[in-house]
Amino acid sequence: MGDEKLKQELLYIVKISSKYDFHNKDVVENILRMENERQILTSVFGKRFKARIFDIAYDQEHDGKCIICGNIANETGTVCNDCIEKISGSPYAKSVLKSDEVVEKSSIFKSKVWPILSKFILACLVLVLIIQLAILGMWLSIPTRNPKVDPYISKNELVAVNDSGEALEQVLLDYPKDQGYSVSFIRLDQDYVGRFNNPVGESSSEIEEALTDEERYDYFFQEPVYVFHVTYSEKYAVKVGVVEVNADGKILVEGQFNDGRDTHSFYRIR
């Protein structure tokens, strides 16, 4: 690893340790998550810091020593104050600070055009608002062709399925061909176990947004599902959707078969 990259990592470690309160678990977990996503820390010191953050996040015992020099770390449990002072006062750190100051001054310079730019933006926003109001007026004047209705709930009983053919038979009970529906098998896939345990007629996205961390653990396990494409044609419109069936015969629907509802969310119908 080059000296430049090592200096960047050491300065990054010091900045993080100086800026955030590592007694706050949310902060520590977010730092760990971001590092796992971005993979910034690749040096020996970076890996030590990442390991120490993991220990702190999950209440694991550690030696309490500075991951850089080995002396007793400060209250953060990661680095000591002496290392923070030396690295923060190094020529490299000062050069980075000067570079940041140049960027800031450049931003201040650009802001001088803001008075003129703000007037232009304001005029554009007013124009957009006028257009939106005109569109809204036209929309409200159009008769409602697709009113919001209660979500469809199947009256058929649960029947376990062993293959795509048996799954198709169950789907056709709710979307029969003689009523204008066209059903075709797409693939065998995976979906969340929790969605098939939701109450019938409830939006999966609304339920998932309200889950606690403990509930998420069980909810987002996956199970095999049979996936079907469903279409329905009528005189003035065509509806399309996706239907999923699990081994227990529970059925999820996503698409335009619940008028006025979220077409990007799954609803359990059986």
Image: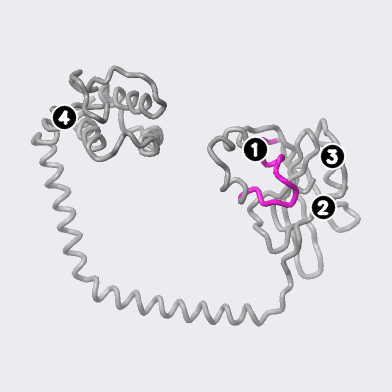
Between marks 4 and 1 in the image, the one whose residue lies nearer the viewer: 4
On the picture, is 253 further left or further right than 84?
right
Do labels 4 and 1 touch, CB within 8 Å?
A: no
- Residue 257, above or below 63: below
The disc placed on residue 158 is: 3
Q: Quadrant of the N terminus?
A: top left
Q: Of label 3 and label 1, which has the lower sequence position?
A: 3
Label 3 to label 4: alpha-carbon separation: 64 Å
- The amino acid type, in three-letter code, at marker 2 is Ser
Q: Of label 4 and label 2, which has the lower sequence position?
A: 4
Q: Quadrant of residue 224?
A: top right
**Region of the chain picked out in magenta, as a range:** 189-205
Which class describes the residues within 10 Å of circle 3: few (<14), some (14-19), or many (20+)? few
Q: Quadrant of the C terminus?
A: top right
Q: Of label 1 and label 2, which has the lower sequence position?
A: 2
Label 3 to label 2: alpha-carbon separation: 22 Å
Between marks 3 and 4 in the image, the one whose residue lies nearer the viewer: 4
Q: Which residue is labeled 2 in the image?
A: 182
Q: Of label 3 and label 2, which has the lower sequence position?
A: 3
Between marks 1 and 2 in the image, the one whose residue lies nearer the viewer: 1
Between marks 4 and 2 in the image, the one whose residue lies nearer the viewer: 4
- The amino acid type, in three-letter code, at marker 3 is Leu
Q: Which residue is labeled 1 in the image?
A: 192
Do labels 3 and 4 touch, CB within 8 Å?
A: no
